[in-house]
Amino acid sequence: MVFNSISYAIFFPIVVILYFALPKKFKNIHLLLASYFFYGCWNVKYAALMLLSTVITYFAAILMDSYGKKKLFLSISFVLNLGILFVFKYYGFFIDIFNRISGGSTSTEALFILPVGISFYTFQALGYTMDVYRGDLRAERNFITYALFVSFFPQLVAGPIERSKNLLPQIRNHGEYCVCNLVEGLLLIFYGLFLKLVIADRAAIFVNTVFGSMDFTGTVMMLGALLFSIQIYCDFYSYSIMAKGSAKVMGIELMDNFREPFLAVSIVDFWRRWHISLSTWFKDYLYIPLGGSRRGSFRHYVNIMIVFLVSGLWHGANYTFLMWGLIHGILNVCSHFISRFKNKEGTISRNISRLVTFVLVVLAFVFFRAKTISDAFTFIGRMFSANGATITDAGLNIANLYALLVAVLILLVVDILKYNSVDVKDRFMHAPTIFKGAIFFALIMIVVIFGIYGVGFSESMFIYFQF
């Protein structure tokens, strides 16, 4: 079940109505059952695995609170949870590395099908145990409350990776019905559908054609790289804001996961704006424990490289993701090094930095999308070769390309306004009712008319589900 499906359009209103109709003592039980049903729609076995992870971290936190042997119980929690993640996600990849080193021929076929969202809920649960270990909060004794924290369906399979200090208190206190929450939540959901169905899924047609064939050259390959960056941003951003909108309807506030990343003025700035919940997770639970920037420049740069290599591996068990992480690690080190000698930038200098950052991000994303590192280098090489085809040869006719251009311009305008501290959402919420209705009607019509749908309305998956 995904947000852009008919099944979710039926499931979500039923869950919300029952949530507000039930007495407080039953609200969390209801949401927990709904969350496990939501996840079980993918595979019931996945739900059992999530329950196992929940039980491990629940008892590890209580034991840390009760017996004081914090390092022991934290280690047990990490070993068991990361062990599960390794078996389901990384077994084949590390066997391949072992074969390359030893010359062996052990099968690299995955032992199990990768459970949807396993990296997200595992990191959320481990973040909670780290918070208890550090004494930032007491262990949650109510199992229903904690289990809902791990499995809360809006952000379960693709984030944001919530912090216990933000989400747990809201789950304990229960969300309250409010018309303003309903309106704001629906606005986020419909804007997310616009980003997903009108931009991301339309761009995917062009991207899949170009990356699926190395017969294209020049402008077509450049546009393919550009559109993949736009596709993955709109695909992931749309899920994040639809998750935020779904939670908001129930009176629960999730964190922002994106803040106009393609307007960043440096690679460091980009990572303050892209997948914020993951980048801050790595900062708090890996980068700072490694020493951060406190142990000299060399150690600082080593810590940055470790974080980005792990980040690349988090995204997938493939050399391309490691390469993507390596590239971003090197770019971050260079950015930190250069910043030591830079004077205050003027407007022109900032815009040049913004353009350079965007180009570097787009080129790095080629490795993220390519099947192999060799394919990525071939793709980039062909970007600068002579043209051999027109852009209409890559799956989208001129009408669809114009529709995509207009939709991207709408996104760009909204992002520029937000970047310049214009609270678009707040302006909307304080606008006259007739204006709100017009915006909702326009969004719905744009999604219905210009959305990309499969045969028989077969919804497309979100890219980050695979991580």
Image (cartoon, helix red, strand yellow):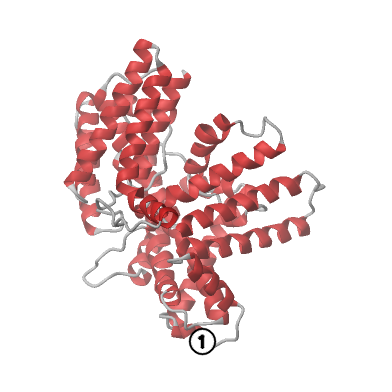
The single residue placed furthest to the top in the displayed view is: 67
On the image, the x and y values in percent for residue 51 come to: 23, 35
Given residues 95 and 228, the one toward you in this image is 95
Q: What residue did someone put label 1 on?
A: 390
Seen at 36% across and 52% down, the residue is 95
Q: Residue at x 40, y 28 (%)?
A: 128
Determine crowd level at label 1: few under 14, some 14-19, many 20+ residues with C-alpha closer than 10 A. few
Q: How many marks?
A: 1
In the rendered image, which quarter is residue 318 located in? bottom left
The answer to whether residue 154 is left or right of residue 407 is left
Q: Position of residue 367 (x, y in %)?
A: 51, 63
Is residue 57 positioned above or below 262 on the image? above
Point out the residue furthest to the front here: 103
Q: Secondary structure at mark 1?
A: loop
Place of residue 380 in the rendered image (x, y in percent of width and height, measured from the top left): 57, 72
- Quarter of the image for residue 129 reads top left
Rendered residue at 53%/74% (across/down): 378
One can see residue 144 in this view: yes
In front here: 290 or 148? Answer: 290
Where is residue 400 drawn, in percent x and y? 43, 78
Q: Residue furthest left?
A: 44
In this view, 57 is above or below 151: above
Residue 297 left/right relative to 164? right
For badge 1, the amino acid type reads: Thr
Q: Which residue is rendered at x = 43% and y = 32% of the image?
A: 163
Q: Nearer the viewer, residue 50 or 104?
A: 104
**Residue 432 showing in the rendered view:** no
Answer with left or right where residue 330 lies relative to residue 405: right
